Amino acid sequence: MFSKKPQTLAYAGMNAQSASGGANALMAAALRNPALSVGGAALMFLLAGAGVLMAAGDPHAGDPMVRMPVTQPGAPPPPGWKEALAPDTMGNAPISVSDLQLTPGAPADTAPIQGQAVISFPGAPPPLAPMDRTAQALPPAPIAGLTSPGPGGAALPAIGPDGRTPADAYARPFHSNGKPRIALVIGGLGLNAKATREAIEQLPADVTLSFVPYADGLQGWMDLARQNGHEVLLETPMEPADYPDNDPGPYTLLTGAQPKDTLGKLDWLMSRATGYFGLTNYLGSKFVTNEKAMSTLMLGVRQHGLAFLDDGSASHTPGGGAPRASADRVIDDQLASDAIDSQLLALEASALQNGQALGSGFAYPVTLEEVTRWVAALPSRGYQLAPASAVMHR
């Protein structure tokens, strides 16, 4: 569901200069407070641990905190380590420590062991609690009666004998509360394991996820997404305007291809996994403007009982009997927090005006972070998060 070539996913570590500034601020707070002189050694111990950690590289880098590994389990704590954490005469605590794992059965002043001291800088938001998705899991795929033999014996989506379609069977159930609904599709998943797992486990179940057909272990990723309550889409590579300089892969749907060739490639793509309720475009700025090519695509979508969503570039294409939706906007064309926030607020405005809105984005780290924070406050602003299947035109 993307009109641009995805950039390489990069995970920036904690800014060393910012962390150093925080450490200096903590040191200054300690020097201003005479009561902390006893705990000077403890403070230096904590800051030294933080420095070592940043040099080594923290897997949680970017969080507003320092996780200090305890390298000598059971060692006596530095003198005054508890006092070093006490508020100063103005009531300001320079640092706070949580989640200290102590020796079993030992008194509270024993050194922490077998864990990490998590040192949060003042003003840092609390970490998000893990979500319990047990009650939200979707039924395992494939559902009996909704497949037919495909290339190499693989399964293709199919309309059931009773007329039930994969578009309906694999969609996430939705119950409207009467508020304007906003749906969001996050795509590009399956190629980067870290980003894919974060999207599946971090984002609310009502966020729809779309997966790259070339991903290794694609079925496993889709199964995990559905276990976490997410409905899923399969991305369909389509010819962009700058093809072949920008090549979406060997099974790209081409504008000049014969219908038989297009449907043959589509069969291969759809046979890669099962459990998706629809297809979405990947690139395709040239393909989606060709009426003949899109008619062939929509024929395949309809025959297999699927839905089709796009990033807004194919909004002129009718459904032709298949459920259809086009995104109102791509939220991360500009990879900056404030730009993404502006796009999310624009989605709210569209939903308020039209009763619903659909956005799309890519699994960039900054996108996942901003979306996670945005959806947490969405109900309090009078909106309902909805799966993409709930904003389809049928």
Image (cartoon, rainbow, N blue to C red):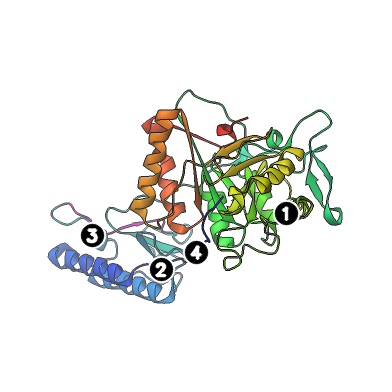
User: Element type at marker 4?
Assistant: loop
Residue on which the image places disc 3: 94
Please provide percent x and percent y for residue 215: 66, 60
Magenta residues span 91-100
User: Which mark is in front, 4 or 3?
Assistant: 4
What amino acid is labelled 2 in the image? Gly
Label 4 close to label 1 by CB (< 8 Å): no
Number of other residues with Cα within 10 Å of mark 3, as a class: few under 14, some 14 to 19, many 20 or more: many
Q: Which of marks 4 and 1 is nearer the N terminus?
A: 4
Please provide percent x and percent y for residue 232: 63, 45
Quarter of the image where one finds residue 109: bottom left
What amino acid is labelled 4 in the image? Gln
Residue on which the image places disc 1: 269
Alpha carbons under labels 2 and 4: distance apart: 18 Å
What amino acid is labelled 1 in the image? Leu
| Mark carried by residue 141 | none
Quarter of the image where one finds residue 380: top left
The residue under the point 42% across, 41% down is: 376
Residue on which the image places disc 4: 7
Residue on which the image places disc 2: 13
User: Element type at marker 2?
Assistant: loop
Please provide percent x and percent y for residue 11: 46, 66
Label 2 close to label 3 by CB (< 8 Å): no
Q: Which of marks 2 and 1 is nearer the N terminus?
A: 2
Q: Earlier in the sequence, mark 2 or mark 4?
A: 4
The residue under the point 69% across, 38% down is: 170
Q: Does the magenta run of residues contain 96? A: yes
Alpha carbons under labels 4 and 3: distance apart: 39 Å
Alpha carbons under labels 2 and 1: distance apart: 36 Å
Q: Is residue 272 above or below residue 297?
A: below
Query: What secondary structure predominates along the stretch shown in magenta?
Result: loop
